[in-house]
Image: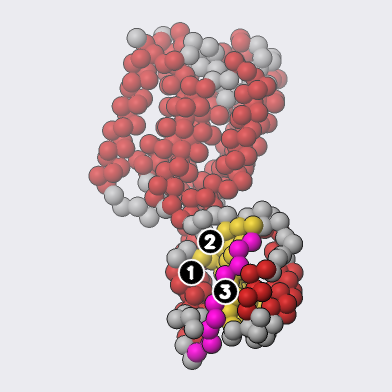
Amino acid sequence: MATTCFWEDIYRRVKNGGRIEGILEPSRAVILFDTKAGDRYDLFIQTEKAWANHVGMEIHAILNAFRLSRIGRKRLTIHVYGERLVDEERVDSLTFQIPAKVTLSRSICTPTMEEDRFRLLAVSLDRQKKAELKKRFSFGQPKVVYGLMLLTFVVMWLAESVGSTFDPNTLIAFGAKVNPLIEQGEWWRLITPMFLHIGWFHFAINMFALWSLGPLVERLYGSIRFLIIYLLSGVLATSASFAFSESISAGASGALFGLVGALLYFGLRDRSLFMKTLGPPLFIMLGLNVGLAFVLGAGLDHFAHAGGLIGGFVVSGVVGLPDEKNRIQRILFSVLTISMFGLFVGYGFW
C-alpha cells in the first residue's frame, strides 16, 4: 500500500509549484499545471473501479470533462489512485487518444481521515499562490504604454505630413540618429530616434510589439519604472548605434528590446514565473523583429537592438522590481548603466 494518497500528493505538488486548474467533484479528479516545468500537466484521479477497462473508460470521461485535448502536445501525467484491480497488470496497456505525451502513474492506496485535511491545505495554498501571482502583475496599469504609442504616432504623422520618412532630410529634421550632428552637440538625438520610424510598416510592426509586450512589463514594474526602463533603454540603444554604426537610424526597436531585458531581469529574480511572463507577447515581439530583419536586411540596426537589450536589463537592476529593497544592488547597476553610456558615447567620439 502506498504511503501517500490522493489529496496528500496533490498538496505536495502544489507546494512544489503546481497550480490547480480544475476540480471535478466530488473530488474524484484534479488537474494541475506545473508552473516550474511550464509544459506539463498532472491529472489526479481517484477511482473505485475494479477492472482496468472500467478505469480506462473513467479516465477517458475525465479527459473529456476537462477538455484536455486543448493542451496540445504538452506533457500529461495521469496519476490513478484506488484499490488494487482484479486485472492490475492491464493498467500499463491503457492508451489515450489525445495529442499530449501521456504518462500513466499508478498508486494503490485507501483514502484516510487525513484526506479532508490535505484537501483544505492544498486548496488554501493554491488560492494563496494565485493571489500572490495576481499581486505580482498589479503594480501598474498600461497607461504609459498607450501614451507612448500615441506620442510615437503623432511624431510619425507629422513627419509624413511634411515629407517622407524614407527621405533622409525628413528623418534628420525630426530627430533621427546622425553621428556627425551628435558630435556637434545635438545630444537630444540620443532620445528622439525612439519616437521616429522609417515608413509606416516599420512604425506598425514596432507599435504592435509595444502593444503586445508593454502592458506586461508595465503591470510587472509599475508605470514610473516602466517609463524609466523604456526611455533609458532607448537612449542606451541609440548610444550603442552611435558607437558602432555610421548609418542614420530611427525606431523604437532598441527600447522594445529594453523591455525584453527587463523581463530577463525579472527571470533572474523569480524563475518560477519566468516562462509564464515571457509567454506569447515576448515571442511575438522577437518574431516580428526577426521578420523585420529579413524585410529590411542591412537597414536594421542590430547594434541598437543589442544595446537596448543589455540596457533594459541593467536599468531594471537600477529601478528594481516594486518589492525589491536591495540598495547595494541598485548602486552597482547604476554604476554599470552610467559606465555603459560613457563607453558607448566615448567610443563613438573616438
In screen coordinates, is 115 left or right of 99? Answer: left
> Residue 67, position in %: x, y?
72, 66
Residue type pointed to by label 2: Asp
- From the viewer's perspective, is residue 303 above or below residue 268? above
On the image, numbered disc 3 is attached to which residue? 106
Q: Are marks 2 and 1 in contact (CB under 8 Å)?
A: yes
Identify which residue is drawn at 46% across, 11% down.
179
> Residue 102, position in %: x, y?
64, 61
In-front residue for pair 177/329: 329
Q: Could you say which disc has been placed on residue 34 in the image?
A: 2
**Is residue 107 part of the magenta span, yes or no?**
yes
Q: Could you say which disc has been placed on residue 13 in the image?
A: 1
Give the distance between the C-alpha atoms of the residues marked 3 and 1, in whole angstroms.
Answer: 16 Å
- The residue segment tinted magenta is 102-112
Q: Residues within 10 Å of mark 2 (few under 14, many from 20)?
A: many
- Going from N to C along the chain, the mark reached first, 3 or 1, is 1
| Quadrant housing residue 232 | top left
Instruction: Name the residue furthest bottom.
Output: 113
| Quadrant housing residue 331 | top left
- Going from N to C along the chain, the mark reached first, 2 or 1, is 1
